[in-house]
Image (cartoon, helix red, strand yellow):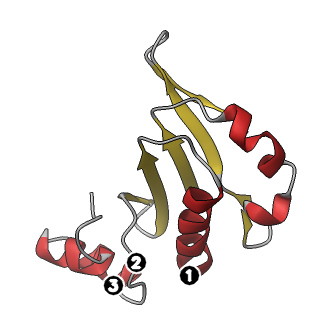
Amino acid sequence: MVADIDMSDYFARSGLEQYSEITEDFEIRPDIVGIIDKKKIVFIESKIVTLGIKEIGQLLGYCLVANPELAILCSTKNSSGNLTTILTHENLTKYDNDKRIKFGYWDHTSNSMLFLN
């Protein structure tokens, strides 16, 4: 978790300097940052509200700055109704050439994350 400090500061303070170097150019604070294969970044933004354009814009901004391998925006609320129109507009969820934000919500019935795209 890094939401309280910049990513590179978090990794440096945690004794993970090798990951601090990967993220040192990005002064952003995603909720969760993961590292894949010691060089690829993953972002997860977790919300307790129904997802909408404001939440998408926050994560999309992070993605445009840092170009993560994977970006997930999830909520504790089913947001499929709100996202139906947004998901048809690729430019609102796309970053880099072929990467798109993934959307999901926690399904309390199955106790699992369900993805909408």
Q: Residue at x 48, y 9 (%)?
A: 109
Q: Is residue 69 visible?
A: no
Q: Is residue 7 left or right of residue 95?
A: left
Q: Identify which residue, 37 or 96, lies in the foreground.
A: 96
Q: CA distance from mark 3 to mark 1?
A: 16 Å
The residue carrying mark 2 is 28
* Tag 3 near tag 1, CB within 8 Å: no
Q: Quadrant of the C terminus?
A: top right
**Mark 2 or 1, nearer chain start:** 2
Q: Is residue 81 left or right of residue 68?
A: right
Q: CA distance from mark 2 to mark 1?
A: 8 Å
Q: CA distance from mark 3 to mark 2?
A: 14 Å
**x then y, percent, for residue 55:** 55, 57
- Residue type highlighted by circle 3: Glu
| Residue at the extreme bottom of the image, as rendered | 25
Q: Which mark is residue 21?
A: 3
Secondary structure state at the residue bearing disc 3:
helix
**x then y, percent, for residue 71:** 56, 56
Q: Residue at x 53, y 77 (%)?
A: 66
Q: Which mark is residue 65?
A: 1
- Please name which of the two marks, 3 or 2, marks the residue nearer to the observer: 2
Secondary structure state at the residue bearing disc 1:
helix
